[in-house]
């Protein structure tokens, strides 16, 4: 199969630990994602589903706002289609290999003025187990335009080469984080982008995002993919890895 990425893009990803693709989601599916997540705070607040983690505010008068919601593909059909689309999986295959399984899909809502910090962390700090290796791949898409002011993703290029670092823990959403929480880092860069931008990044790159201090939402969706056979098929009660492409392990 021809590569979906250029060799230069693959080399950039391997060197820096991430790859940004502007305009990856075309206008029509992006508009669907916008519509399906527009009133999600209110819809989820009515049902109080277990896969939602809420922002914690000091002011009790503030309306409930989602920080992150797992299983977003089950709530938003447009996201489910994106997760499984050949255009998405072709790039995943270039970076991860031909044996691809779905790990999870989550929404990161970071609402206007009230979306809080996501501290510096490595995803493998959450996912590491005795029977897996750090060969996962994330694809984050911006549903809204993302800027420094509304809390775009920030990464430390090349930090995936450091291996898994020691994380601190706290009982909260994003409760594993690197020492310093979200202190300023001279080696971090912001990844700003318009709605429809996609960012592919591995499980060892250091990343986080600042609070949303703007009047504009910064909705994003992150899908994580795994190499089929890497770790347990049932990761926890929320995450059952499903084969999307390649060898037929873990077939239902």
Image (cartoon, rainbow, N blue to C red):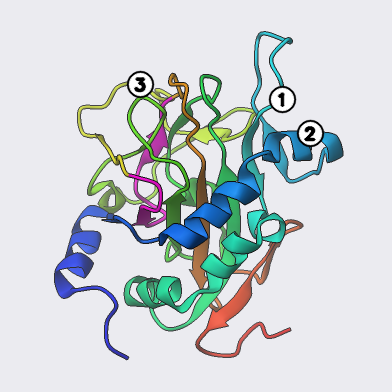
Residue 64's disc is 1
The residue carrying mark 2 is 45
Q: CA distance from mark 1 to mark 2?
A: 7 Å
Q: Quadrant of the rendered structure where residue 236 is?
A: bottom right
Badge 3 or badge 1: first in the primary sequence:
1
Residue at the image position 39 percent from the left and 77 percent from the top? 90
Instruction: Out of 89 and 249, give the one closest to the viewer.
Output: 89
Binning the other alpha carbons within 10 Å of mark 2 as few (below 14), some (14 to 19) or many (20 upward) gives some
Q: From the viewer's perspective, is 26 left or right of 11?
A: right
Instruction: Out of 103 and 63, give the one closest to the viewer.
Output: 63
Question: In the structure shown, which secondary structural element does the residue marked by tag 2 occupy?
Answer: helix
Does residue 205 lie above or below 251 as drawn? above
Q: CA distance from mark 3 to mark 2?
A: 32 Å
Badge 3 or badge 2: first in the primary sequence:
2
Residue at the image position 51 percent from the left and 69 percent from the top? 226
In percent of width and height, residue 4 lies at 29, 77
Magenta residues (range): 194-210
Q: Is 42 inside the magenta-drawn segment?
A: no
Q: Is 196 inside the magenta-drawn segment?
A: yes
Question: In the structure shown, which secondary structural element does the residue marked by tag 1 occupy?
Answer: loop
Residue 183's disc is 3
Q: CA distance from mark 3 to mark 1?
A: 26 Å
Quadrant position of the N terminus in the picture: bottom left
In percent of width and height, residue 241 lies at 64, 70
In percent of width and height, residue 228 lies at 54, 78
For this orientation, the residue located farthest to the right is 47
Binning the other alpha carbons within 10 Å of mark 1 as few (below 14), some (14 to 19) or many (20 upward) gives some
Of badges 3 and 1, the one in the foreground is 1
């Amino acid at each position: 199969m021809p590569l979906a990425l250029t060799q230069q893009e693959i080399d950039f990803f391997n060197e820096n630990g991430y790859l940004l693709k502007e305009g990856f989601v075309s206008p029509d599916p992006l508009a669907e994602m916008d519509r399906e997540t527009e009133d999600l705070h209110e819809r989820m607040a009515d049902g109080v589903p277990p896969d939602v983690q809420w922002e914690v505010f000091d002011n009790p008068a503030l309306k409930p706002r989602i920080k992150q919601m797992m299983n977003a593909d089950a709530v938003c059909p447009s996201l489910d289609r994106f997760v499984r689309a050949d255009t998405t999986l072709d790039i995943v295959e270039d970076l991860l290999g031909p044996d691809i399984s779905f790990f999870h899909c989550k929404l990161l809502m970071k609402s206007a003025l009230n979306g809080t910090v996501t501290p510096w962390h490595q995803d493998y700090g959450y996912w590491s187990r005795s029977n897996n290796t750090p060969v996962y791949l994330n694809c984050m898409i911006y549903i809204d335009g993302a800027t420094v002011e509304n809390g775009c993703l920030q990464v430390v290029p090349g930090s995936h080469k450091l291996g898994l670092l020691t994380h601190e823990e706290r009982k909260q959403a994003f409760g594993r984080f690197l020492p310093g929480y979200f202190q300023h880092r001279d080696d971090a860069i912001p990844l700003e982008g318009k709605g429809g931008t996609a960012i592919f990044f591995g499980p060892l790159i250091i990343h986080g995002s600042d609070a949303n201090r703007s009047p504009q939402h910064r909705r994003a969706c992150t899908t994580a993919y795994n190499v089929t056979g890497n770790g347990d098929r049932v990761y926890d009660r929320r995450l059952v890895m499903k084969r999307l492409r390649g060898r037929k392990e873990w077939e239902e």
